[in-house]
Image (cartoon, rainbow, N blue to C red):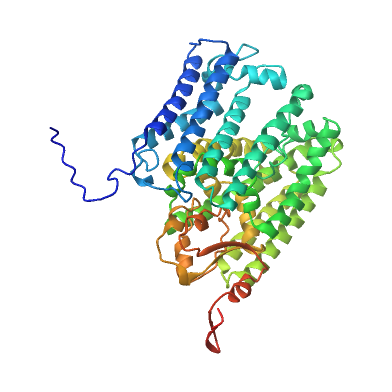
């Protein structure tokens, strides 16, 4: 006879957070795929490299599909965030910390020690985990894989299969399903297949590589304005000119227009690969974002400092190489200087005007932003007047190497993804992405996008704040019936999806959204008094 005594008084399952047998088997099959890949990396292989690759990734893909179906699709549709704080993986437990260390270590090796992963040097054959991707690379390019081809393949695989898991989880929400299909499409075709196929058809451009990701744009793509990248595009013929012109249109026309119409969500939640990985593979950790006021203050200072660094770095790089060979480019150093100074002064004036109009007289932000733009313009002008070949009295290479190391690699990769299980899935997007910063300023100052709230329905459950991966205290806005217009909001819509009362709604109305939402209120409070609309 068992001596076990169940002290639970619950008439339901007292252990609701345990995984079922089929879910455990699904996880086991995924671990088997990882083991096969790991054995190959260690030099132990039971089949050809192509067969090993196929078996390993088939097992991992089927594992995710099987687990997703058993965990979500076999249950009634609805948000399933049960037991996230009981999970060692999702609540900064031992498993979460181990995974964070593994991811961080992988990114360190990827950026600075690719030979440890098996990257062959000076034409030597690949070994280790990178060699596992040689057969697929040969299909696209006719040559062995690089560490970046391996990374791009793994990245795309993660977005696709974790995206399917995300769709199973939120299948009752049409917005989430379409949004996830969008990021899966853009990652698979625009970021992976099209660039790899074009590169293969053109022989890798014989060493003159340039970024052919149609959705990648400056300042997120910080290599765009560098001399080698510009030269490679312009020397690639019609296809290079197409990408050059498209990149300029994307920055100066397409992006501002779409942000005005739909807010930054059009890019950060529907297109961007960084956001795509955060929303799909990073979904189990979205609740770990810090919602404190101190985190918000750090976020605002840090992300706009990175944006300023990105501006300064780009100006310094372009200014430097225009001065080295004036006859090579149609744009001269003098012309570039005058254009940048004019744009910066116009930007400073525009920001001051818009902030005075919309920020209730918050003069500190006006002075800081406008002053920074003016200071950069003055420093650039001084360089030009003194005849210095380097912008800001430093070489463009110094800015480029510092930005590439600290922002492009350490922040966006090592911290941005490696810290998913520790700080949440949008660490990079929230604290460091210059693209998110510039789109956020546009969204805050001139965009139709708002999250409207119906405060009378709010029960203060806190789901919206808990699952906001950008650390916004959504509940505080809902309790006050205040519409949410935040520069950091990526419009993912999860706050609305997890709300049990339908308090939150993502809208693209007129710019005066407050007058629009006032039409839906039953109680109208104004200087004339309180009016109750009995017809509602």
Left or right, 413 with reference to 123: left
How many numbered marks, from 0 up? 0
> Residue placed at 50% from the left, 63% from the top?
502
Q: Is 108 rendered above or below residue 354? A: above
User: Quadrant location of the C terminus?
Assistant: bottom right
User: Quadrant location of the N terminus?
Assistant: top left
Instruction: Tell me where residue 175 appears, x and y as whole percent.
Output: 59, 52
Instruction: Tell me where residue 134 appears, x and y as whole percent.
Output: 62, 17
Left or right, 335 with reference to 128: right
Q: Can residue 182 be seen from the camera position used here?
A: yes
> Residue placed at 40% from the left, 64% from the top?
460
Instruction: Tell me where residue 47 appears, x and y as whole percent.
Output: 54, 10
The quarter holding residue 114 reads top right
Q: Can residue 480 be seen from the camera position used here?
A: no
Q: Is 496 rendered above or below residue 234? A: below
> Residue placed at 63% from the left, 70% from the top?
513
The quarter holding residue 344 reads bottom right
> Residue pushed farthest bottom?
528
Left or right, 98 with reference to 445: left
Left or right, 291 with reference to 2: right
Instruction: Tell me where residue 376 appears, x and y as whole percent.
Output: 67, 53
Which residue is more in the foreground, 515 or 331?
A: 515
């Amino acid at each position: 006879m068992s001596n076990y005594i169940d002290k639970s008084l619950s008439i339901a399952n007292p252990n609701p957070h345990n995984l079922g047998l089929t879910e455990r088997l699904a996880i086991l099959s995924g671990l088997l795929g990882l083991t096969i890949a790991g054995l190959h990396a260690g030099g132990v292989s039971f089949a050809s490299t192509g067969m090993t690759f196929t078996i390993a990734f088939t097992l991992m893909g089927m594992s995710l599909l099987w687990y997703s179906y058993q965990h979500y699709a076999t249950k009634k549709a609805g948000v399933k965030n049960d037991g996230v704080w009981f999970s060692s993986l999702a609540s900064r437990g031992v498993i979460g910390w181990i995974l964070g260390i593994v991811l961080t270590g992988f990114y360190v090796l990827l950026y600075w020690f690719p030979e440890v992963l098996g990257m062959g040097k000076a034409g030597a054959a690949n070994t280790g985990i990178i060699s596992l991707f040689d057969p697929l690379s040969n299909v696209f390019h006719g040559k062995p894989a690089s560490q970046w081809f391996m990374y791009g393949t793994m990245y795309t695989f993660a977005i696709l299969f974790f995206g399917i898991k995300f769709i199973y989880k939120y299948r009752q929400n049409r917005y989430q399903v379409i949004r996830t299909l969008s990021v899966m499409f853009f990652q698979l075709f625009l970021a992976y297949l099209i660039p790899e196929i074009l590169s293969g058809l053109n022989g890798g451009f014989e060493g003159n590589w340039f970024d052919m990701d149609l959705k990648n744009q400056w300042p997120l793509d910080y290599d765009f304005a560098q001399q080698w990248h510009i030269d490679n595009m312009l020397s690639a013929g019609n296809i290079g000119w197409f990408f050059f012109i498209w990149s300029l249109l994307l920055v100066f026309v397409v992006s501002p227009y779409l942000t005005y119409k739909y807010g930054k969500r059009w890019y950060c939640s529907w297109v961007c690969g960084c956001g795509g990985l955060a929303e799909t593979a990073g979904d189990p950790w979205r609740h770990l974002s810090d919602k404190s006021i101190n985190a918000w203050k750090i976020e605002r200072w840090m992300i706009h400092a990175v944006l300023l660094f990105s501006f300064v770095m780009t100006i310094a790089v372009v200014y430097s190489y225009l001065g080295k060979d004036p006859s090579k480019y149609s744009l001269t150093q003098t012309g570039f200087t005058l254009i940048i100074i004019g744009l910066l002064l116009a930007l400073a004036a525009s920001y001051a005007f818009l902030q005075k109009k919309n920020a209730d007289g918050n003069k500190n932000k006006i002075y800081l932003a406008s002053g920074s733009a003016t200071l950069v313009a003055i420093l650039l002008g001084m360089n030009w007047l003194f005849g210095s070949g380097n912008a800001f009295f430093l070489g463009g290479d110094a800015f480029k190497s510092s930005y590439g190391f600290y922002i492009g690699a350490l922040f966006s990769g090592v911290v941005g993804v490696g810290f998913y299980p520790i700080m949440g899935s949008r660490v990079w997007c929230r604290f460091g992405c210059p693209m998110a910063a510039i789109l956020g300023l546009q969204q805050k100052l001139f965009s139709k996008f708002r999250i409207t709230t119906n405060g009378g329905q709010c029960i203060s459950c806190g789901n919206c704040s808990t699952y906001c991966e950008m650390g916004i205290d959504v509940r505080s806005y809902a309790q006050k019936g205040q519409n949410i217009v935040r520069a950091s909001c990526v419009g993912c819509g999860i706050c609305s999806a997890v709300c049990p009362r339908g308090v939150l709604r993502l809208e693209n109305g007129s710019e005066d959204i407050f007058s629009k939402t006032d039409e839906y209120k039953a109680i109208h409070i104004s200087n004339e008094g309180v009016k109750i609309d009995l017809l509602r």
